[in-house]
Amino acid sequence: MKRKIGVLTGAFAGLALSTVAAHADCGKVTISEMNWASSAIVTSVASFLMSEGYGCDVAKVQTATVPALTSAAETGEPEIVTEMWPAVATAYRDLEAAGKMITVTEVLPDGGVDGWWIPDYLAQEHPELKTLDGILANPDLVGGRFHNCPEGWGCRVSNDNLVKAFDLAGHGVEVFNHGSGETLAASIASAYTDKQPWFGYYWAPTSVLGKYNMVAVDMGPIDPDLAACNARADCATPGKTGWPTATVLTAVTPAFAEKEPAIVELLKHVQFSNDMMGALLAWQEENSATADETAVYFLTNNKDVWRDWLSDDAKANLSALLQ
């Protein structure tokens, strides 16, 4: 598989040389390459299409959320910020309101999904477990345990408050606090392999939920105010609420939007469902692939998806790949 990926990557690189030379319609473009897998894949796919389809000279800027936003607002680079989570990067909305950043699209239209989950085979055998009320009434069916995320993760504070609000201990559910993301993921893999009960926290899109079919537990109505309180360590009255879905954006600087309207139009269409991104992340993990190699895999196997993202000229430039 790695050899096949290498051949495809080489072929795409060769096309890049010929395309940029023939269609140098676009100047230099800087785009963020965040330090997590899904964002890096989005960046690699967008970079390829900008380069080969639109003739851009693309430079990836390795960064993280806060420094990317600060730099974009203060220096104008990176000009494109992929996979921006405003719920985490709270400064983004202020920058947007001040006209320093422009939202282009919801790159993950399903949103970032936090939640409590059970395996699909458990849901099929015991449908009552698809609701939290059903789990609390039947703790033995989930093994009497809730798998919590590690200390220091953003989810931990919310989970600890939700555990109190729903009184898991009072209903016979022990909380197991994982020491790392690796052990949390391994617990799902182990349970799924042996078809054992599992109940706990995870999020999407991730390679884990791309690989294992998990069912989100219905925790009841979502109350944004209660969720906001639960997210604080000093929340005096933790409340019962489901997890709100997080908006995930691609944003650009105003100067870039004015300079490169064709690229902005492209970026409006660069979107990935959580199922698609989860499958890509699972494939990347299984094949020890880089973000660029995963982008090649996506572009090779999903032409019917990304061809509609392109302008007519870009389709002509990429006609060899679209056949």
Image (cartoon, rainbow, N blue to C red):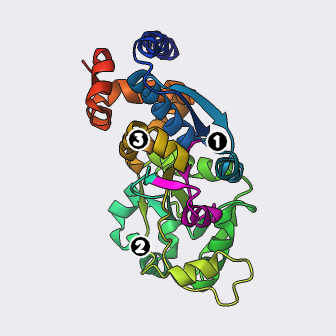
Instruction: Give the side of residue 19 with respect to residue 59, left or right.
Output: left
Query: Which residues are drawn in magenta?
Result: 79-103
Q: Residue at x 55, y 48 (%)?
A: 253
Q: Residue at x 39, y 42 (%)?
A: 270
User: Which is more N-terminal, label 1 or label 3?
Assistant: 1
In this view of the protein, can residue 47 be seen by the observer?
Answer: yes
**In the image, which is nearer the foreground, mark 3 or mark 1?**
3
Does residue 117 lie above or below 277 as drawn? below
Is residue 82 something one can see in this rendering? no
Residue at (58%, 40%) from the top-left corner? 37
Q: Is residue 272 left or right of residue 249?
A: left
Q: Which residue is mark 2?
A: 218
Q: On the image, numbered disc 3 is attached to which residue?
A: 261
Q: Quadrant of residue 235?
A: bottom right
CA distance separating discs 3 and 2: 42 Å
Q: What is the x, y in percent for residue 286?
A: 52, 31
**Along the line of sight, the residue nearer the viewer: 119 or 208:** 208
Q: Residue at x 51, y 79 (%)?
A: 224
Q: Amino acid at mark 2?
A: Asp
Which amino acid, by three-letter code, is at mark 3?
Answer: Pro
The residue type indicated by label 1 comes to: Glu
Horizontal and vertical percent position of residue 150: 71, 59
State how far apart marks 1 and 2 are (Cα): 41 Å
Of mark 3 and mark 2, the one earlier in the sequence is: 2
The nearer-to-camera label among 1 and 2 is 1
Q: Which mark is residue 77?
A: 1
